[in-house]
Image (tube, grey):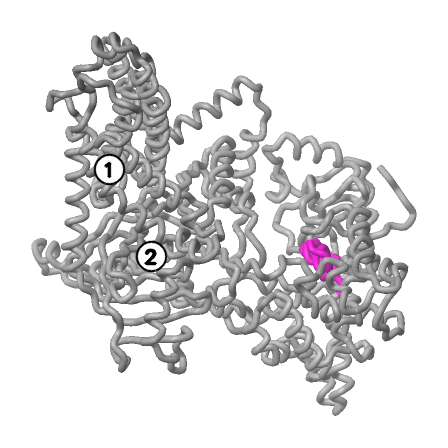
Amino acid sequence: MRGSASHQRRWASDTVPGRTVVSSASSPGTESNSAEEYVEVTIDLQDDDTIVLRSVEPAPPHVFSIEDGAGAGSETPSSASPSPSIKRSSSNKLRHFSQELKAEAVAKAKQFSQELKAELRRFSWSHGQASRVLSASTSSSAQNGNGFDSALAARALRKQRAQLDRTRSGAQKALRGLRFISNSSKTNGVDAWNEVQSNFNKLAKGGFLYRADFAQCIGMRDSKEFALELFDALSRRRRLKVDKISREELYEYWSQITDQSFDSRLQIFFDMVDKNEDGRIAEEEVKEIIMLSASANKLSRLKEQAEEYAALIMEELDPEGLGYIELWQLETLLLQKDTYLNYSQALSYTSQALSQNLQGLRKKNRIKRMSTEFVYYLQENWRRLWVLSLWILIMIGLFTWKFFQYKHKDAFHVMGYCLLTAKGAAETLKFNMALILLPVCRNTITWLRSTRLGFFVPFDDNINFHKTIAAAIVVGVILHVGNHLACDFPRLISSSEDDYHRYLSSSFGKHKPTYWDLVKGAEGITGILMVIFMAIAFILATRWFRRNLIKLPKPFDRLTGFNAFWYSHHLFVIVYILLIVHGILLFLVHKWYLKTTWMYLAVPVLAYAGERTLRFFRSGFSTVRLLKVAIYPGNVLTLQMSRPPQFRYKSGQYMFVQCPAVSPFEWHPFSITSAPGDDYLSVHIRQLGDWTQELKRVFSEACEPPVAGKSGLLRADETTKKSLPKLLIDGPYGAPAQDYRNYDVLLLVGLGIGATPFISILKDLLNNIVKQEEQADSVSDFSRTSDNSVGSNDSNTNRVSPKRKKALKTTNAYFYWVTREQGSFDWFKGVMNEVAELDQRGVIEMHNYLTSVYEEGDARSALITMVQALNHAKNGVDIVSGTRVRTHFARPNWKKVLSKLSSKHCNARIGVFYCGAPVLAKELSKLCYEFNQKGSTKFEFHKEHF
């Protein structure tokens, strides 16, 4: 136990291992007497003499009290049962820690009691009481006729109360904020300064760094205006107005910027706003810094409303109406930010979840860990494994069958094992060329995934299986063609006349052919053409060409993009015709029933042809009438159309769209964003390729600027004078997200336009919530009616009773939308507001993330966070999204998100649905795997595929 004559206060973070509850015999405004009131003070004790004040509350009937004369570790319970707040934890670590620090806690608490009592007398017990004190002081002074003095007195009283707020543990998070250098910078201070020095050497002219290059030098290239204001503020502190600085002065500036003291950073931020150096910030200066922060964070709309938000800050911080604010008020706003941000708060941990997760943290031996991982891998992938295993076994069987079959033929004596390998590969090619059509029979797949077969076969991986088969075809073509051209044919033409006439004349004729004769024949020509067409289709279908990742000069740039992929893939029609011809004109097989190529292809080709025929007629009959068109920021086109009577779909499904005015042949898939309960269909299309660019251009010509109160840059509806282009639809088709009803809890993650599949799910959940509430109301109304109607008979009762539907299994849904453009929130503003308004039970929790804004704690976004908190507290609207849903800054910490879900929903089955870039898909899949190893909550990851 460390002891000292004078106790110095130090306040630490919230995360400490131990906690002690002390009862102090003091209450505000009263001294100890026979009727004294007790309060329960919860504090945290650390090894470094740090004491964190957790809470001060009226004491419950039974508390532990610390006697003045008690020795170390002595305690006197006021009753037989201890306070609930000091029950022993189930964690061994916490129990051991509490026993070890028992004596130290008592001594520290006694040493701290006098100072604590003094602060408790000044403590504001509630916001209501504080307001009453302030209003009473103000009104009393006003009655004396001294308005200005009363305002100063009221502000002094607020300043006195604010001093204690900074010592409370809840302020520690804010005290760690207000960074001028982002966390993404080098964590080592020496390395960071070395990088700044390197930049100085590159940018300096004549040994001096000019003001215009300051931003680039310290790593604020993307926030040049903010960096220049920072430069001016640091210069003013030195009573200088300079345009260039030396290396030594740069180091001094850098030391102030990177100072770990919150007071220092707050003072720099204050000096940036206080340009006239009078120690006061006027409303105009607040407006300027808001515009500067908005510019640094690419929030153009915020700049337009800077005056309104400046007035909001002054209203909050200057209730006395003095016309200025001081440093301590800015500090108060920063510390109280989390108090205002009481909407859409993060999930909280529970002790049950803590004990649940401790089991997963215990170290396992290597063999047990590997076996656990293997079992989990089988549980997650058994459907894929058995399908792939069966497919591989079939290919091995076909290859082996043909290999040994041709080993007994005469041609083997001349061509050898090259012939056997070529024929074995040819048999797998027939099988795979037939099988590759089945995964793209979308109507069949959609129907099958709703049957019991969907439990055994991973139909959602149909496109991945299609790609895997294509890779196997490439291998088969290399083996088949390579062995023929490089091995079989050379052996044939170099064979002796006796061997030729003995073994091959019956198949190739009396005269031995030349190499050119073999290549230019019908068999050779069809084979070479197939290889060429398949190579074109395969290359243009790769990610580099399809996603425009390869930049080619004109006119070869037309070979990249979705159009090139789509048209080249239709070369398969020619390939299949050539394949049938090639299979009929075989060298070594003459009986028709042994030429099996057509037998492999018959059923799959007919099935695929039937699919395309069905799509053709169904799209023709599914005529739709466009009801509304809107073009939003971020190049997003929204199409709302009439819903055909026969079009039945589920939330999470998608459909194909064709616009004859753009292309009479191309069909493109888009997620349906309307809910099954809506009487219309809607899709949101982002401009990403040449087809979507042309689609936007066509509809832009028919759109007009929106009327007041309507969102969107351009709009059109049925009242528009210009005629809207014709639109054809086909679908719906199945997708992983449509199975969301099978899960207890949903985690929906969308990046940018990837939010579209989940908007329909949110709408559907909301419709179910409203229906359940209406159903509950109707049941209660019916109960009251039946109680009053004593003479009614049972048959009447049964007729009037409302029909109850099966309860929805999903209890909670968490929607995370990550985007980099502020205008993106306009796409689904109506849906978010509707959910926030109607979901009174909190079933749906929405989180918007804007990555263009610097993360919380960065000085460039600090004021925006303050304004965001104030505006929502007053008006209930988020300043960034314009909705009732809070917008977070930077990117989510996905590990923390899943950890909190696991803590809140123990033993639940959570469906994680994702639509967006593949990089995050890998991260989420890995995190699901890790958390499934730890606790009883099970995460099942699904990614959208089109």
Label 1: state its secondary structure.
helix
For the record, the magenta segment spans 163-182
Q: Is residue 171 above or below residue 866?
A: above
Tell me the distance, in whole angstroms, between the alpha carbons under discs 2 and 1: 28 Å
What residue lies at 23% left-to-right and 68% top-to-bottom? 726
Nearest to the observer: residue 72 or residue 938: 938
Local packing at callout 2 (Cα closer than 10 Å; few below 14, some 14-19, many 20+) is: many
Mark in front: 2 vs 1: 1
Instruction: Return the mark for residue 438.
Output: 1
Residue ranking furthest to the bottom = 145
**Residue 842, quarter of picture:** bottom left
Which quadrant is home to the N terminus? Answer: top right
What residue lies at 26% left-to-right and 11% top-to-bottom? 497
Q: Is residue 310 above or below residue 605?
A: below
- Dot 1 amino acid type: Leu
Task: Look at the image and tell me whether residue 36 can be seen.
Answer: no
- Dot 2 amino acid type: Ser
